[in-house]
Amino acid sequence: MDPEFSAQLIDHLQVGVIQLDGEGRITSWNTWVARHSGLSTTEAAGKRLEEVFPGIQASRLPASIEQALRFRLSSMLAPGLNASILPLYNKKADRALDQRMQQLIYVTPIRHPQCACLIQVQDMTATVRRERRLRAQSSKLIATTYRDALTGVGNRRRFDHDLSQLFLAAQNEQKPLALLMIDVDDFKAYNDRFGHPKGDECLVMVARALQEGLRQKADRVSRYGGEEFGLPLPDTDLEMACVIAERLRQRVNGLKIPHPASRTGGHVTVSIGVSAMVPRLDQPADILVAQSDLALYTAKDHGRNTSVYFEPESNELRSCS
Amino acid sequence: MIELSEMQRDALGELFNIGVGRAANSLSMIVREEVELSAPSVSLVHPKDVASTLLGSDLRELSMVTIDFAGPFDAQTILLFPERNALAIVSHMLDPDMTPEEMSEFEQEAMCEVGNIILNACISSLADEFQVEFEGGLPEHHFSDSDGLPLFGEDRGQVILLLQIQLGMRQERMQGHLLFLLSVSSMQALLDCVDQYLERLGMG
């Protein structure tokens, strides 16, 4: 191919092409780079890339060029891992705001007297933007699949996911993790008396009271099933978990939702089973659920509207209040 | 059948650890946190045994980055992580809330670059110490399940240098493998380089 034709072809590419000699000096760059950098190829020729763009020193690009020149190895620099390395802009206004083009950069060695290293730059701005939009949408979808449609708190999938994540973190960091299992007392009788729509309303009110009674936003109540809710509490020991359980129990009690068929005193109440542990590496997360469940059954046996905790050292079950 | 002597194995282990050490530095720069990388073991396996060796380490869904190198010996290098581990690596670097379903082209590129950094560092460490020159291509990233691994077992004339890779980041440890696929003659050339290197150190 004659050199004039090659130069024209390269200038028409919708990709940045920068050529370096064996010393790492720019021999030329194409129209695309000139347009987006605001510097002509004659202004850049003979200089090293970091002289023209001092800001690239902190990036991986100089090392990649070095690898191409010294070891003849190729590199790619992805937009996700490297904040826009070169000061290239799509529009004049972007330059004023320093909104750089998102870039995917390839650095490859070349064997030619005039060019020892080829740098290609692709504009990924649109891709990154689309990626962000898709991510936002998928986060929204994921939020939907993790939400209980009736009560608006987390669903069973959320609970399982949260518990396994928190359990793993507690194992790794050797910090305590507590779990509250919360069950509405005599809920079947409530449904039988008032019908399912009223039963649903009751669950919504209880769920809201529980969620609003939490310490911080990160604590998340999930509907475990039927009228049972689960609440994992990171970095929480047994004592603190009991305090939280009692507060939540009293909150629900305080709603005073009428429940004539209840065996606990005329309105809707909950029973709560509590457990907490610093999990060993060989323990599965089910242990915590089993212990809290056991405590919950005991709370039911003890007349409901009460919180009971599992004492792991003695395997005993005691009242939180 | 080619085998590694104790001396050759130690030398390769040392050289690869220099390489992954450098890669760890580059990765730390990107995530602005400490990244630990080590290659605790080197072994020579035959293609037909690779699948079983790897399957022993819960590799089913695989993320792999490959780069071809040409020089005194030619090698196809592959950095293999179980998909879960690959995802953990990339999500640590990009976005801790990402789920596997969201792993898109964008993250594949990031994984590609991580592989690029590790593989280049290993090869440049060999090139440095062996005083030879290689030519390395651009990295490619694929997902694959281990049943569909097209790379192994087809060419009976190949041997595979297998390295275990440990990557530690933010209190998590992830295991992967680094594979060098070499023809028998390339493997011989690699071992010649190792022997010359040992001789220069007065250990040949």
Image: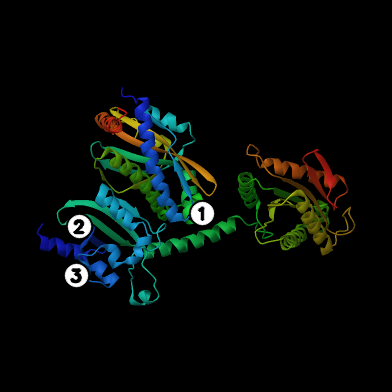
Residue at 42% from the left image edge and 47% from the top image edge: B24
Identify residue for label 1.
B98
Identify residue for label 3.
A42
- Along the viewing direction, whichever of A247 and B117 lies nearer the viewer: B117
2 or 1: mark nearer the eye: 2
Quadrant location of the C terminus of chain B? top left
- Please report, as a chain letter, where disc 3 is located: A
10 Å crowding of disc 3: few (<14), some (14-19), many (20+):
few
Q: Please state which amino acid type lies under the numbered disc 2.
A: Asp
The local secondary structure at tag 2 comes to loop
Residue at 15% from the left image edge and 57% from the top image edge: A114
The percent coordinates of residue A27 (x first, y second) are: 19, 62
10 Å crowding of disc 2: few (<14), some (14-19), many (20+):
many
Q: Please state which amino acid type lies under the numbered disc 1.
A: Met
Q: Please state which amino acid type lies under the numbered disc 3.
A: Thr
Residue A158 seen from this side: yes
Residue A277 is left or right of residue B45, and the answer is right
Tag 3 and tag 2 share a subunit:
yes
The local secondary structure at tag 3 comes to helix
Residue A144 is left or right of residue B143, and the answer is right
**How far is the residue under mark 1 from the one under mark 3?**
45 Å
The local secondary structure at tag 1 comes to loop
Identify residue for label 2.
A21
Q: Are marks 2 and 1 in contact (CB under 8 Å)?
A: no
The percent coordinates of residue A220 (x first, y second) are: 67, 57
Up-down relation of residue A270 to residue B4 (above or below) = below
The percent coordinates of residue B53 (x first, y second) are: 43, 30
**How far is the residue under mark 2 from the one under mark 1?**
41 Å
Q: Which mark is residue A256?
A: none
1 or 3: mark nearer the eye: 3
